[in-house]
Amino acid sequence: METITPTTRILYTARTHTTGGREHGMARSSDGHLDIRLSSPGTDGIGTNPEQLFAAGWSACFEGAMGTAARRRRITLPEDTAIDAEVDLCLEGRELFLQARLNITIPGMDREMAQQLVDEARGICPYSKAIKGNVNADYKLM
């Protein structure tokens, strides 16, 4: 297990308390901004599920990473930049795993430049770095 080194600068720590898991759970952040019910995907439960939360977090983080890549090039992402994230919960044999896709739209930007921003963002986004080699992920510029 790796530990945080004294030279690591922590920018933010998210703290949540979850009970009940994905079946009929609840999750609340320490600051109260997140207070949600959880339910299993594909059921009639009234809550969200971990896959939806991951899709929302990853896509938001990735768009931020594209913005960072754009600023480094002294350009601006169009305001109507959008990402449609898809996260699949899969079963193979008895093993569960995730696979995911980001469908990225950058209207009005030269396709070559847009692709360069997407490629660069993959190395900036903490979510993309965390899943690299662990989750099959596709990044598609629409």
Image (cartoon, rainbow, N blue to C red):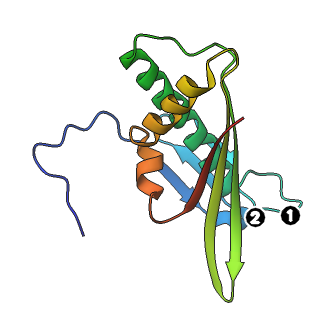
Q: Is residue 92 visible?
A: yes
In the picture, measured across the screen, residue 112 lies left or right of residue 90, that is left
* Amino acid tagged 1: Thr
The residue most toward the front is 112
Residue situated in front as seen by the camera: 7 or 122: 122
Q: Tell me what residue is drawn at x 47 percent, y 47 percent.
A: 127
In the picture, measured across the screen, residue 54 lies left or right of residue 105, that is left
Residue situated in front as seen by the camera: 28 or 90: 90
Q: Tell me what residue is drawn at x 70 percent, y 19 percent.
A: 107
Picture quarter with the N terminus: bottom left
What SS does tag 1 mark? loop
- Quadrant of residue 34 in the image? top right
Check disc 1 and report the residue beneath it: 43
* Amino acid tagged 2: Ser
What SS does tag 2 mark? loop
Residue situated in front as seen by the camera: 42 or 64: 64
The residue most toward the right is 44
Picture quarter with the C terminus: top right
Give neighbour class at mark 2: few <14, some 14-19, many 20+ (Cα, 10 Å).
some
- Quadrant of residue 32 in the image? top right
**How far apart are the alpha carbons under marks 2 and 1?**
6 Å
Numbered mark located on residue 142 in the image? none
In the rendered view, would you say 71 is above or below 102?
above
In the rendered view, would you say 122 is above or below 67?
below
Check disc 2 and report the residue beneath it: 40
Q: Tell me what residue is drawn at x 58 percent, y 61 percent.
A: 19
